[in-house]
Image: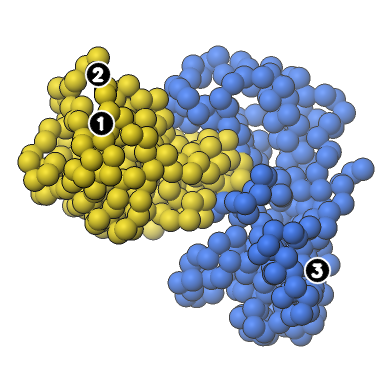
Amino acid sequence: MLKVLKSGFFTSIQDLGRFGYRDMGVPVSGAMDTEAVKKANQLLENALDAAALEITMTGPTLLFEAPTFICLSGANISPTLNNEPVSQYQVLKIGKGDILSYGKMENGFRSYLAIKGGLETPVVLGSRSQYIPITQKKCLKDGDELRYEETVAFEPALSGLKVENKFQQNELEVFRGPEFSILSDSQLATLFAQPFTVSEKNNRMAYQLAELLPGHKYSMLTSGTLPGTVQFTPAGRLIILMKDGQTTGGYPRVLQLSEEAIGLLAQRKFGDSISFKLI
Amino acid sequence: MKNHPLRIEPFGQRAVLVEWPAQVSESILAEILDFVDSFKNLGLPNWEVSVAYNSLTLVNTRQNIDFEQVKTQILSAYEGIKVKTKHSNGFLWKLPVCYEEEFGLDLKEAAEVLGMTIDELIREHTAYQYTVYGIGFLPGFMYLGGLPQQLEIPRRKEPRLSVARGSVGLAGKQTGIYPQNSPGGWNIIGSCPIPIFDISKEQPCFVKVGDKIQFEPISKAAYDLKKIEAEVGIYQPQKKRLNA
């Protein structure tokens, strides 16, 4: 078992998401920074959709009750193993009784912990990703115990990777959304000319941006939305839906983030600056 | 059939939006559902579809797509719709609702605003069959169409921070059931004891887009019984096949 001594600010179990239930209104969920979790799983030679921990802002304290191998990726929250600093994007050997904890967040916002064979928590509707009401809990709580298969020996083909993080890249690549054409010249000018600030309203469901565009009165019938859809409210607010975002919505969808841009935004936090680049 | 101009647009790198004319219309919905059948018959792997009112979002769950290629497939699926309407296997679901004051927090006020008695409001609300035009927003949340004009009432000025799961509400041209506890601004007139979305079932959501819903008033005693049945998972919502 992986014992959660302290859960941290918001640590949840995530794989690549829950597919096939969109028509019932079930969000896709899954890791916010897909590339980061995939790389960690690749180094462990896991299936790409093996379940990992997504760690937000402040890290948990975790006790490993059986030997295994892990790999850390994404945001650097100064991880330590038995109080010794350890590197990200490296396969780390874990002994029985080892304790992993975290310190100061050096960069990014979401960090990942992948484990050899993946976490073996219950699969609900084809995924282990935590999301209420599909799973009972939305994130880890102190005292939780997560199952994993013990691994004593493992010779990784590649013991580590040098990864250049893109946490300083403010520019998000976007496509025109289905209602892009409703944007006026002045709205367009504001949308692409200035940077926007991530507001305090940001989570796995959506990121709201602090600055407003000139408002609008466009009304439409509710229609499909995706992770990365940029909604535009009548008040001029931009809301970027993320992995736990609703499957339908009634606000105009003016932009759609590229898959890579969703991962970049997942590493941004309150007060960070972003801008849009139309491709 | 098949006389509508379709708008087919890329929606990011992995999805395509197909739009019919912007109307809340049973015949458009029927054509979209026919199209979904026809598209599924192409047997293309890894596609999710979601229908809402006049639109269909097709999402590839695995990879980025070649829009032009998918557009061709969509047009071929549209051509492939059988002339005679095929998708007719929806259900009419009779869903029990208890309109007692304990649940209908805004029932009295709503009746006053609408200029009718509470009994009249209940009679009106249960007299119609509402069409399911979409399921989204929250797992199991149904977008229902067909509310009579005499039941149109503005949203509450201040939304409630928490509306109980099962609450039945009225707002504008909409009526519906909150599938989970959630914040909400609708006028709450009753409660449905049967969960629309139940994770313990193999098919978590028994309702599908294109089905119809009719509410049936029940007593508090019947509500309590159905609630217990729901908790132990033995409830059987009443259904009747449509267009049989």
Disc 2, SS: loop
Residue A196 visible, this orientation: no
Disc 3 to disc 1, C-alpha distance = 57 Å
Query: Seen in the image, is A40 located left or right of residue B60?
Result: left
Measuring from the top left, give residue B153's x and y in whole percent: 64, 72
Name the amino acid, label 2: Pro
Judged from this view, the residue extending furthest toward the right is: B244
When asked about the image quadrant of residue A37, the answer is top left
Label 2, residues with CA under 10 Å away: few <14, some 14-19, many ≥20: few
Which of A32/A149 is in front? Answer: A149
When asked about the image quadrant of residue B229, the answer is bottom right
Which of B209/A194 is in front? Answer: B209
User: What residue does disc 1 label?
Assistant: A69
Look at 64% across and 83% down and name the residue there: B102
Task: Say whether disc 1 or disc 2 marks the residue closer to the N-terminus.
Answer: 1
Asked if marks 1 and 2 fall on the same chain, the answer is yes
Which of A72/B16 is in front? Answer: A72
Asked if marks 3 and 1 fall on the same chain, the answer is no
Rendered blue, the chain in question is B
Measuring from the top left, give residue A191's x and y in whole percent: 30, 42
Establish if B191 lies above or below A102: below
Query: Seen in the image, is A14 located left or right of residue A91?
Result: right
Which of labels 2 and 3 is toward the front?
2
- The subunit carrying tag 3 is B
Measuring from the top left, give residue B230's x and y in whole percent: 69, 63
User: What residue does disc 3 label?
Assistant: B216
Name the amino acid, label 1: Phe
